[in-house]
């Protein structure tokens, strides 16, 4: 990967949600366009639209959930608890608002056909035989409390927005000369010899006195023992409240009755068709010819209705279904263009329609099967409903408990007992906590959170003996603590660490001597080349750097090699100093054209994303964006 491309990584992350619209939409973006509710906590104004705190909270929850699914056990919620991460979510929301406003202004639209094809292409929405699984599609939407109509309207808006983004990115162009030059730099190979000055070789030359060792001890923090506390803590999670939630049969029956449509399968119809296509820009004569042909085919179909499949293979212009006898499989309302759908849902099984005109041409339709609408009985979905009610009740319970938790640990700050009693939580104790997270502990250990540890070491917690504030350490997880013992920072006695201090000082002095000798050798080589002592040549390139010390690689590739041999020095820290002798610079004898084409496309993509970001910045200025107050998000939770 080019360094050029690396420099655009942050830009690529900012545009991620703009580039991959459909998966983002699938989890609730419909609320992102326009105002969300009537919440007064408006964060930003974009033209006549607002971004509210609840909208931002929802965006953070959804982004965290997406990353949780992608990263699994490696997911760290602290990645989202930074000013940069929070601002990036707001920037994404602003970008989507300005694109939506521009799409509406330009009256960009998406045809029913394009919308259907997009939905049908989503992974996981196909049956084993490759057909669109409408039942699963509807179930997925129901799980997000969405109807097909609401989702499809939202997706249509998003696809219109994407038209703007794609059009802007398509204007980017990477000059061939630039792409070739960057490829050549990426492929360039350098033969490098090394002369390594190791600190261990200079240890015999190091002489240190007791006074030097004591001065080193006094001036270093290597022997500091950090302050430690023993603390009590309570943790609030939905699991801690699970025993307080009870779902009754009456609750289940009520939910079933109120959401009966979620458990209902709409009527589905299976049909075959013969399409006589008509181009969008067809002349009147071409349309008349197509209609005449369709009438002729219809007459043949009516004469031989049992040969419909054979006639579809012979006459139909729908190449996707003609080979299968025109079979379209089962579909429900909303999955076909309206004239076609209207005709199908008027037919009886086995009946053949007259000519049906749509935007694609003339259809001859035969209805082959009907699946009537049906509802799942309560007994079949009882457990599913109970789980959903429990989830909703627990969500509400946690939301209410979180407020009580935060208020109680603050208002009755002398002890954690009041909050433990109110919410039936267990008070736990942990010793030897410092003000920095312990890297040996798992990231999901509640008390190993940087913000919580910082609060434990605050004046309020240490001197005033007050509870910490409630700290969100993960989605749906709050913690509060109370210091019960404090051990101030100290330093290990000099007598105890004298020998270790002497060893460390000698190593430090040896590193300095190695570096000094290396720099002296480098200066001498600049005046007169001397290959003696150097290692055998090693080939280094940007494409092959895995086995090369990073400091050596960067130094070798940055060195001016216009005159050979060229020399450079790499400071390796506690590993010493390396003098590099570059003896040859060359390009590979063969060119991988496919790789170069891919690299040029990478450059074009990066430039396209720059153009897209620049256009969004332009729209923000044109439409007007005003940040009303700094981000102060409430603790996020994942549904």
Image (cartoon, grey):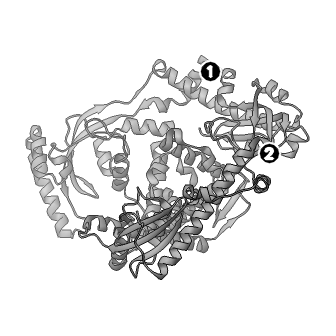
Q: SS for tag 1?
A: loop
Q: Report, in whole angstroms, how far the alpha carbon at label 2 lies from the one at label 1.
A: 65 Å
Residue at 60% from the left image edge and 40% from the top image edge:
638
Question: Circle 2 — which element?
Answer: helix
Residue 619 lies left or right of residue 86; in this view the side is left
Rendered-image quadrant of the C terminus:
top right
**Image location of residue 627, percent across then percent down:** 69, 64
Q: Position of residue 359 (x, y in %)?
A: 29, 58
Most foreground residue, 513 or 323: 513
On screen, residue 54 above or below 290: above
- Assign the N terminus to one quadrant of the image: bottom left
Quarter of the rendering containing residue 90: bottom right
Residue pointed to by mark 2: 494
Q: Are marks 2 and 1 in contact (CB under 8 Å)?
A: no
Residue ID at (57%, 46%): 64
Give the percent coordinates (x, y) of residue 244.
69, 22
Q: 420 or 624: nearer the eye?
A: 420
* Residue marked by disc 1: 247
């Amino acid at each position: 990967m080019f360094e050029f491309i690396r420099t655009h990584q942050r830009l690529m992350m900012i545009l991620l949600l703009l580039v991959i619209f459909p998966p983002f939409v699938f989890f609730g973006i419909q609320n992102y366009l326009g105002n969300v509710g009537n919440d007064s906590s408006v964060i930003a104004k974009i033209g006549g639209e607002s971004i509210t705190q609840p909208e931002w909270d929802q965006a953070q929850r959804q982004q965290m959930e997406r990353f949780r699914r992608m990263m699994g056990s490696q997911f760290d919620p602290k990645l989202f608890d930074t000013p940069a991460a929070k601002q990036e979510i707001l920037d994404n929301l602003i970008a989507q608002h300005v694109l939506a406003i521009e799409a509406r202004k330009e009256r960009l639209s998406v045809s029913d056909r394009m919308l259907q094809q997009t939905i049908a292409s989503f992974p996981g929405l196909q049956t084993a035989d490759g057909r669109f699984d409408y039942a699963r599609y509807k179930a997925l939407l129901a799980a997000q409390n969405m109807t097909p109509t609401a989702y499809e309207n939202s997706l249509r808006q998003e696809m219109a927005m994407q038209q703007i983004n794609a059009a802007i990115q398509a204007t980017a162009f990477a000059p061939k000369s630039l792409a070739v030059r960057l490829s050549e730099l990426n492929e360039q190979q350098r033969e490098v010899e090394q002369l390594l000055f190791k600190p261990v070789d200079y240890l015999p030359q190091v002489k240190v006195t007791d006074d030097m060792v004591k001065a080193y001890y006094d001036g270093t923090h290597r022997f500091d023992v950090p302050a430690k506390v023993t603390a009590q803590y309570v943790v609030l999670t939905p699991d801690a409240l699970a025993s307080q939630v009870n779902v009754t049969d009456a609750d289940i029956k009520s939910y079933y009755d109120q959401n009966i449509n979620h458990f209902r399968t709409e009527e589905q119809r299976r049909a075959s068709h013969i399409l006589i296509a008509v181009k969008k820009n067809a002349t009147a004569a071409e349309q008349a010819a197509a209609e005449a042909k369709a009438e002729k085919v219809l007459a043949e179909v009516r004469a031989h209705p049992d040969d419909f499949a054979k006639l579809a293979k012979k006459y139909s212009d729908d190449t996707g279904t003609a080979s299968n006898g025109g079979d379209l499989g089962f579909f429900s309302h909303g999955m076909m263009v309206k004239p076609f759908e209207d005709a199908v849902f008027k037919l009886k099984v086995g009946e053949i329609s007259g000519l049906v005109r749509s935007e694609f041409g003339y259809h001859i339709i035969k209805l082959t099967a009907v699946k009537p609408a049906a509802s799942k009985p309560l007994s079949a979905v009882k457990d599913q409903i109970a789980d959903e009610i429990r989830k909703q009740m627990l969500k509400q319970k946690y939301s209410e408990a979180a407020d009580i938790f935060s208020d109680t640990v603050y208002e009755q700050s002398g002890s954690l007992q009041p909050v433990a009693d109110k919410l039936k939580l267990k008070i736990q104790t942990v010793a030897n906590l410092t003000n920095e997270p312990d890297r040996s502990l798992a990231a999901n250990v509640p008390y190993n959170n940087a913000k919580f540890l910082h609060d434990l070491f605050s004046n309020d917690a240490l001197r005033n003996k007050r509870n910490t504030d409630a700290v969100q350490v993960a989605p749906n997880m709050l913690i509060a603590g109370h210091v019960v013992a404090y051990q101030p920072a100290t330093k290990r006695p000099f007598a105890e660490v004298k020998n270790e201090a002497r060893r460390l000082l000698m190593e430090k002095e040896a590193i300095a001597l190695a570096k000094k000798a290396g720099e002296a050798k480098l200066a001498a080589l600049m005046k007169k080349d001397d290959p003696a002592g150097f290692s055998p040549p090693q080939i280094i390139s940007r494409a092959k750097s895995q086995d090369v010390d990073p400091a050596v690689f960067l130094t070798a590739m940055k060195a001016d090699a216009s005159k050979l041999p060229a020399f450079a020095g790499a400071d390796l820290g506690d590993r010493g100093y390396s003098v590099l002798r570059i003896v040859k610079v060359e390009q590979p004898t063969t060119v991988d054209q496919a790789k170069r084409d891919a690299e040029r496309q990478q450059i074009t993509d990066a430039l396209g994303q720059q153009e897209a970001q620049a256009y969004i910045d332009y729209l923000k200025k044109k439409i007007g964006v005003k940040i009303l107050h700094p981000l102060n998000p409430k603790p996020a939770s994942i549904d």
